């Protein structure tokens, strides 16, 4: 089990690997454009070469996080077009830079209802995957449930995947904070088992490729997206013990998106808290990301 983090790409994407090494991140998530803007990623050939070389040396799996403005459920044609275009670009850049895939939020139906927007969401996901025909995974993240979010339950995500024809490159990232805020009680072994039963039934464990490991400032079912440092929120240390003990997560990289002890984002202290639980539970630390040739 890899314990990784979202890492700042300020100054160029290749810089994430040095920052990841500094805090001990064993997997990396980054933005390749400003997450609150539509401005497309602009990565020079030199930056591409630097990124690829650093990634190979670091030998850690890399994920992009899509821009926050993406909304595949929008009824605004221009916004929808930009959303689809942004995801297409991210997947193309993923092929160029050699990442696992792009994690994104499906968006919001803004009161129209999940069933109403489902066909459009599935069609647009199909369009993105067809355009970016390489090896990149398109990874749906569960939402915390505020503001008409789409993909707030494992059942909704399952319906989206089925509606998109069960495309093999359509995968899922489970955010522990969002799930907890939606009422999945991951903080207890019983609640965790129940939640993951639903996940297995509606989605299947083979689709789970990443975990956003965040504690929650919001109590169970509070439906608000507020991340807390590991162990300091309502999920707590025992909650992360229950999560990490569950077999569904055994080979899935954990990516922290926590505020940080000093407020500077994921840090060594937060990573070490999860690594301590991993050691305590006897879960093996990762070997090389790239399997040695047989
Ligand atoms: Zn997240
Ligand atoms: Zn969040």
Image: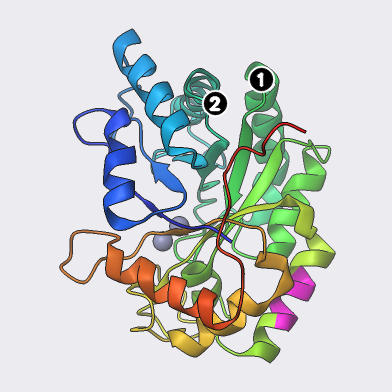
Label 1, label 2: how far apart the Cα atoms are:
8 Å
Q: Give the quarter of the figure containing the C terminus.
A: top right
Q: Mark 2: which secondary structure?
A: helix
Residue sitting at x 43%, y 86%:
236
Residue 121 quadrant: top right
- Residue at mark 1: 134
Q: Are marks 1 and 2 in contact (CB under 8 Å)?
A: yes
**Which circle marks residue 104 in the picture?**
none
Question: Cβ(mark 1) to ligand 1 < 8 Å?
Answer: no
Q: Mark 1: which secondary structure?
A: loop
First-in-chain label (1 vs 2) = 2
Colour treatment of the image: rainbow
Report if residue 36 lies within the magenta region. Answer: no
- Residue at mark 2: 91
Question: Cβ(mark 2) to ligand 1 < 8 Å?
Answer: no
> Looking at the picture, how far across and down is residue 26, in whole percent?
45, 52
| Towards the viewer: 49 or 116 | 49
> Looking at the picture, how far across and down is residue 124, in whole percent?
64, 30
Q: Magenta stretch?
A: 193-198
Residue 72 quadrant: top right
Residue sitting at x 66%, y 81%:
192
> Looking at the picture, how far across and down is residue 283, in whole percent?
61, 72
């Amino acid at each position: 089990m890899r314990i990784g983090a979202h890492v700042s790409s300020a100054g160029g994407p290749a810089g994430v690997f040095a920052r990841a090494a500094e805090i001990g991140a064993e997997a990396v998530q980054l933005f390749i454009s400003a997450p609150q803007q539509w401005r497309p990623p602009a990565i020079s050939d030199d930056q591409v070469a630097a990124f690829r070389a650093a990634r190979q040396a670091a030998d850690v799996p890399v994920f992009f996080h899509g821009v926050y403005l993406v909304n595949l459920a929008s009824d605004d044609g221009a916004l929808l077009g930009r959303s689809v275009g942004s995801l297409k670009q991210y997947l193309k850049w993923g092929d160029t830079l050699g990442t696992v895939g792009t994690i994104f939020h499906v968006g919001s139906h803004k009161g129209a209802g999940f069933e109403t927007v489902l066909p459009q969401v599935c069609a647009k996901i199909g369009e993105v995957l067809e355009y970016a025909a390489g090896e990149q995974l398109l990874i749906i993240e569960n939402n915390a449930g505020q503001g008409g979010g789409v993909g707030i339950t494992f059942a909704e995500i399952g319906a989206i995947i089925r509606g998109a024809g069960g495309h093999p490159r359509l995968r899922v990232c489970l955010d522990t904070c969002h799930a907890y805020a939606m009422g999945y009680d991951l903080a207890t072994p019983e609640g965790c088992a129940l939640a993951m039963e639903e996940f297995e039934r509606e989605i299947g464990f083979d689709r789970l490729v990443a975990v956003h490991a965040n504690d929650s400032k919001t109590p169970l079912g509070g439906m608000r997206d507020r991340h807390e440092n590991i162990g300091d929120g309502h999920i707590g240390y025992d909650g992360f013990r229950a999560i990490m003990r569950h077999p569904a997560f055994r080979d899935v990289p954990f990516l922290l998106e926590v505020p940080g002890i000093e407020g500077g984002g994921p840090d060594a202290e937060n990573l070490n808290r999860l690594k301590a639980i991993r050691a305590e539970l006897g879960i093996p630390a990762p070997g090389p990301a790239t399997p040695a040739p047989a």
